[in-house]
Amino acid sequence: MSAPVLLVIAHGSRDPRHAATVHALVRRVRALRPDVRVETGFLDFNVPSVPGVLESLATEGVRDVVALPLLLTRAFHAKADIPAVLADAPARLRVRQAEVLGPSPLLLTALERRLYEAGLSPAGKSSTGVVLASAGSTDPEAIAVIAAIAREWRHTGWRAVRPAFASASLPRTEQAVRELRELGCARVAVAPYVLAPGRLPDRIARGAAGADVLADVLGPAPEVARLLVERYEAARTPVRMALGA
């Protein structure tokens, strides 16, 4: 029996870097799981759309789909618009929504990878303050998750970790950078807790002007690809059980 199709659902953006990054991540997932068919759908701005992909899969005779939101927190998209889109899937499809990617230890490893790739030395970790810079949300649950991740990450050896947000919430990246300077951190680094480039990540980058190091977005980091596979496997298990596999 074939494995359920993995449908990676991305938000989409007018910025072409966004879709290019999503496709690079999906290629890495395909390399990890060549036995699984992996498709990509976008909620807005880019094609193919999620409804279009679902209709195409149903037309081909696909029966089982695991829809994986390419999101780091459970905010509006994960709670409202993605479930609404999936509810309108063709009736002949069995679609299961996987959990969002965060929080996960793999994401912390990916964040550190990006910081070291940007020139930060692991040897200076104990004297370095890090800004965990998120896109931001009006959802209190999502904001609380970012704050909890910052606290957890601090305990891995950083001098300090402060959350920051590009929109909707405070503090902004530049405020968190100043706070870490005032705390006496020898170096200040900004780690964007975002998956792909776009308007809000660019705002994070502008706010990092006073920092010593600005990491790249998470993008197709190996840890992120592994996490997608983990979320897929966790979501497909009930599908296998329901089918008697």
Image (tube, rainbow, N blue to C red):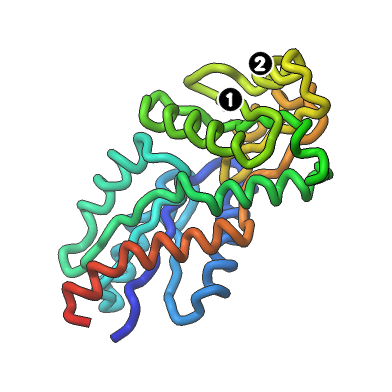
Residue at coordinates 70% horizontally, 44% vertically from top-left? 216
Where is residue 47 shown, x and y percent of the image?
47, 55
Q: Is residue 8 above or below residue 142?
A: below
Q: Is residue 69 above or below residue 228?
A: above
Badge number at residue 175: 2
Q: Identity of the amino acid at label 2?
A: Gln
Q: Position of 122 compared to 57: left or right?
A: right
Mark 1–mark 2 CB contact (< 8 Å): yes
Element under disc 1:
strand
Check disc 2: other Cα within 10 Å, few if <14, some if 14-19, many if 20+. some
Where is residue 189 shown, x and y percent of the image?
74, 32
Where is residue 183 shown, x and y percent of the image?
72, 16
Residue at the spot of label 1: 164
- In front: 118, or 206? 118
- In front: 15, or 139? 139
Q: CA distance from mark 1 to mark 2?
A: 8 Å
- Return the disc, 1 or 2, that comes first in the chain's sequence: 1
- Residue placed farthest to the top in the image? 182
Badge number at residue 35: none
Q: Identity of the amino acid at label 1?
A: Ala
Q: Is residue 125 above or below residue 203?
A: below
Where is residue 86 shown, x and y percent of the image?
26, 53
Image quarter hosting the N terminus: bottom left
Residue at coordinates 61% horizontally, 34% vertically from top-left? 154
Residue at coordinates 37% horizontally, 27% vertically from top-left? 139
Q: Position of 113 compared to 172: left or right?
A: right
Element under disc 2:
helix
Residue at coordinates 28% horizontally, 39% vertically from top-left? 80
Q: How many marks?
A: 2
Q: Position of 77 compared to 90: left or right?
A: right
Check disc 1: other Cα within 10 Å, few if <14, some if 14-19, many if 20+. many
- Residue placed farthest to the bottom in the image? 1
